[in-house]
Amino acid sequence: MKKIINPCICGCFRYLDKTLQANAFVKIEFENGKLSISGVIGPKTNGDCWGSCGQCTDEIRQGTPKENWSKEMLNKLCDIWDEWHLNDMRPYCKHQKELGWDKKANKKVTLYHYTLTAKALKEKNDVEKLALEMAKQGKTFTPTREQIIALNREYFKTSWKEIDDENYQPKKSLYNGDGGSTEIKTLGWLRESDHPDGILSKECPVCGYKYGSAWIKEDVPKEVIDWLFALPDTKVKPAWI
């Protein structure tokens, strides 16, 4: 099954103090139990578009409803879209969803990145140089406790909380786009070794399935499919969708 709808008009960008308004189109496909939803705002005949395309639910929610549409319908459409699009690619099992892991996976947390200070790096390098020099002379190198500690310090360290260690300093940005000392990630992309609340590869307490280890199909409720395909078809033919 397939249908194309024209639920709203969206503002795309400002030009000469005016906001360009363009039709938003949404394609809904349901085949072999798989639901796929995608949208485009202001499609052009050259294959471009005036606004966003793909998973543009944020823009659709803010749109002005077309005839036979309401704000409530727009929100319900986007709620279904966010929850059920690509329902055959779930990283969780049914038990993990019942436990709320699907929502927990989207929770954002901050990671803190550190590098060795210049002093700590020199101490580490000095021990390595000394060990190499003694090896060249055929001598046995027996490091002190302090040298062992210095030698085993990692160049980089990442923590889910800020650390107070004189041997480490916040990492500096190396290029545009590099977050430097902090990074925002979601729990669904973190293991428990990265963050105590991370769920990536965490076992389900019921069936043992490891979160994110495969794509699992979750059946879309019949009432959801019935509601989607009862929506008004577009009266305007889009350049593409």
Image: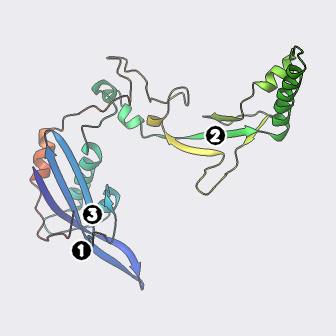
Label 3: which residue? 40
Disc 1 secondary structure class? loop
Position of residue 132 in the picture relative to residue 110 (left or right):
right
Label 1: which residue? 45
Foreground mark, 2 or 1? 1
Q: Is 153 drawn above or below residue 86 in the view shown? A: above
Q: What residue type is labelled 1?
A: Thr
Given residues 35 and 11, the one toward you in this image is 35
Kindly report the distance in space between the C-alpha atoms of the residues bearing marks 2 and 1. 47 Å
Position of residue 145 in the picture relative to residue 13 (left or right):
right
Q: Is 67 drawn above or below residue 58 in the view shown? A: below
Q: What residue type is labelled 2?
A: Tyr
Residue 100 drawn at (x, y percent) = 36, 31
Lower sequence index among marks 3 and 2? 3
Given residues 166 and 136, the one toward you in this image is 136
Kindly report the distance in space between the C-alpha atoms of the residues bearing marks 1 and 3. 13 Å
How busy is the neighbourhood of tag 3: few (under 14 within 10 Å), some, or many (20 plus)? many
Determine the image quadrant of residue 175. Answer: bottom right
Q: Residue at x 21, y 59 (%)?
A: 26
Q: Which amino acid does label 3 sit on?
A: Val
Label 2: which residue? 112
Kindly report the distance in space between the C-alpha atoms of the residues bearing marks 3 and 2. 37 Å
